[in-house]
Image: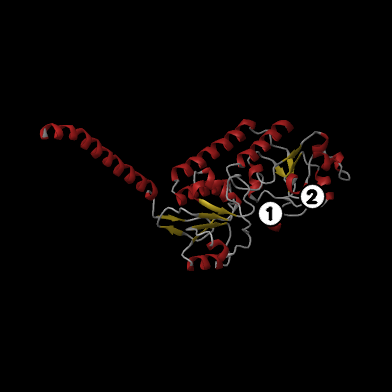
């Protein structure tokens, strides 16, 4: 009976052996997935370089644009808290934390291994978090589209999603390039006014937003010979805008301030503007028109459509 019993046990032992081997391979693969690409040195434009020894598993984002990009590259599961202004995506763990005046003790309460901010001019936040064993990655607002693409890639590298970050940058670039190519030179000879709020604060072509309009060959009425004046964010007068009579008016104050084509037409004298009379007042989503995220494509599409209609 013993030989027969041994023969009956052989298949069972083989199955157990194969199962154990598969589990070891699975564990090894999981460990490899978590460590591939690390340690990684990150060199953000305009901010200090840092080295991450391991993939961060608990990330706090105090930058709405970065929050969107973290989810876009597939790192959403690693995000444990975001600031009060990070409204996209809806599932992001939004808190009452301020990205403008971050509290190191409040941040430490979320037990993060990485905190991402868009500014730390005096380095005090980084210093305080470093004492608590928490690394800080500063990602300033990009000044160009190329810098934005590079930031997508960097966020992918920082979170263990390098391929996804590179793919996001490539797809965003291709979509924008196609939207620009589709209208060709239709924007040449057209000028525009981009409104940040009803008190006529605007942008020049020296800003990130202005460079989007530059892609279409549009002329900015706010440049006035020096696009860099006032940091690229001057306040115009109603008289200056009426005198310029822009072909296109883009409203980036629809959510914050309730502005739309009708309210613009009701302003004293604005009903005579070409953009108003021709129906070329474009209502933008404030967030999309001000954040360097993958949704920038929606902003570019709105400009592309407006240019095509006005040509």
The image shows residue 33 at horizontal and vertical percentages of 38, 46
Q: Can you give x and y, in whole percent of width and height, for residue 127 in the image?
A: 51, 68
| Above or below, comparing residue 219 to residue 5 in the picture | below
Relative to 40, 289 lies left or right: right
Front residue (pair 30, 217): 30
Q: Which residue is at the far front? A: 1
Question: Element at badge 2?
Answer: loop
Reading the image, the residue beneath label 1 is 232
- Label drawn at residue 198: 2
| SS category of the residue bearing label 1 | helix
The foreground one among 222 and 97 is 97
Give the quarter of the image for residue 84: bottom right
Give the side of residue 309 with respect to residue 28, left or right: right
Quarter the N terminus occupies: top left
Label 1–label 2 contact, CB within 8 A: no
Tell me which residue sits at (65%, 34%) in the image.
Answer: 185
Of residues 274 and 139, the one drawn nearer to the viewer in this rendering = 139
Q: Is residue 184 left or right of residue 170?
A: right
């Amino acid at each position: 009976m013993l030989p027969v019993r041994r023969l009956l046990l052989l298949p069972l032992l083989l199955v157990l052996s194969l199962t154990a081997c598969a589990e070891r391979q699975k564990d090894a693969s999981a460990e490899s997935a978590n460590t591939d690409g690390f340690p990684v040195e990150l060199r953000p434009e305009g901010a200090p370089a840092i080295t991450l020894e391991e993939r961060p598993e608990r990330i706090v984002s105090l930058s709405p644009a970065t929050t969107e990009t973290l989810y876009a590259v597939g790192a959403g599961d690693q995000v444990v808290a975001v600031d009060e202004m990070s409204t996209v995506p809806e599932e992001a763990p939004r808190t009452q934390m301020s990205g403008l005046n971050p509290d190191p003790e409040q941040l430490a309460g979320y037990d993060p291994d990485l905190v991402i901010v868009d500014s730390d001019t005096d380095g005090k936040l980084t210093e305080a978090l470093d004492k608590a064993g928490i690394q800080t990655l500063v990602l300033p607002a990009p000044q160009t589209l190329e810098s934005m693409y590079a930031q997508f890639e960097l966020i992918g590298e920082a979170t263990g999603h390098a391929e996804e970050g590179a793919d996001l940058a490539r797809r965003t670039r291709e979509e924008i390039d196609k939207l620009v190519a589709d209208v060709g030179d239709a924007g040449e000879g057209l000028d525009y006014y981009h409104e940040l709020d009803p008190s006529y604060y605007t942008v020049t072509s020296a800003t990130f937003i202005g460079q989007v309009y530059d892609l279409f060959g549009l002329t900015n009425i706010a440049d006035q010979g020096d696009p860099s004046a006032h940091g690229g964010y001057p306040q115009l007068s109603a008289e200056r805008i009426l005198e310029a009579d822009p072909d296109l008016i883009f409203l980036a104050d629809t959510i914050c301030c309730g502005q739309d084509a009708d309210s613009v037409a009701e302003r004293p004298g604005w009903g005579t503007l070409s953009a108003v009379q021709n129906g070329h007042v474009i209502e933008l989503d404030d967030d999309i028109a001000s954040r360097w995220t993958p949704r920038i494509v929606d902003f570019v599409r709105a400009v592309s459509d407006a240019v095509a209609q006005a040509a």
